[in-house]
Image (tube, rainbow, N blue to C red):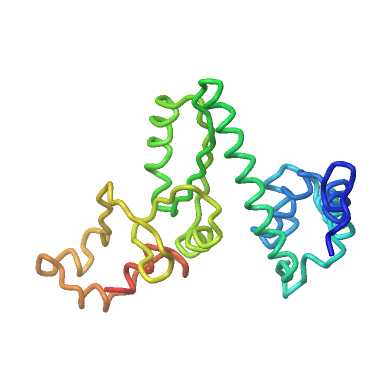
Amino acid sequence: MQNSQSREGLPRSLHSLLHHVTFRQLQIFMAVSRHKSFTKAADELFLAQPTISLQMKKLVDAVGLPLFEQIGKEIRPTDGGQDLYAACRDLFRTFENLETQIADRKGIRRGKLRLGVVTTAKYIAPELLAAFGEKFPGIEFSMKVSNRDEIIQRIKNTEDDLYVMGQVPTGEVDVEAIPFAWNPLTVMAPRGHPLTMAEKPVPLHAVAETPFLIREPGSGTRHAYLRL
């Protein structure tokens, strides 16, 4: 049995959904899903939290399924919410590709570039983006800075186009990595500290036996240290 069609040629169920759902609601939904928080989504989109809540209620009513569930302090997508997130991601990518194709037909080099970088790369990424922007002024780019674990999650969700990391996440995600810069890790100590007076180079066991500050769990720097 074939689905009934609307006058526009769309299945009636899809036509009804498109009639009640806006792109802005889908954009808000994706932000809430990424951050697992209405408050953080509101901050990202420069909206008031009541606006976020109202638009999500309208979206839930239009879809006819619960899209989020409260787990502790986090708001996580339900199974239906995860399906909608995947569909929204594909939808927005399709429209971005269409925008690029239209620009190409007009002879204009345009598009969008999303860059995800670990915290230690935030010191070199802006300089690289500035040079890229001068060479390709029609390309709109954005940069998300986060720790290693969150960047790996963004890779799994294909939220960005390129990533800059200190270490290749081998075995965690399937990626193609191209090294382009040297990023040594250095132990620092004040003058007079026993490590500064130890034999050179300082043996790793001496470093391991010395209390010192390292980054938080999820950090690539911490991950590299714990592998030693």
Give the x, y percent position of residue 18.
83, 48
Q: Nearer the viewer, residue 148 or 154?
A: 154
Figure disc tally: 0
Q: Nearer the viewer, residue 97 or 32?
A: 97
On the rendered structure, is 109 left or right of 212? Answer: right
Height in image: 200 above or below 210? above
Give the x, y percent position of residue 172.
42, 70
Quarter of the image that includes the N terminus: bottom right
Q: Nearer the viewer, residue 38 or 213?
A: 38
Q: Nearer the viewer, residue 15 or 48?
A: 15
Inspect this view and state whether residue 189 appears: no
Task: Tell me the residue at 28%/75% (across/down).
Answer: 210
Height in image: 143 above or below 152? above
Extreme residue in the top direction: 107
Name which quarter of the figure residue 134 lies in. Answer: top left
Height in image: 21 above or below 210? above
On the rendered structure, is 222 left or right of 19? Answer: left
Height in image: 215 above or below 19? below
Quarter of the image that includes the C terminus: bottom left
Give the x, y percent position of residue 137.
48, 24
Inspect this view and state whether residue 140 appears: yes
Extreme residue in the left direction: 199
Give the x, y percent position of residue 71.
73, 74
Task: Tell me the residue at 28%/51% (across/down).
Answer: 179
Task: Tell me the residue at 20%/68% (across/down).
Answer: 195
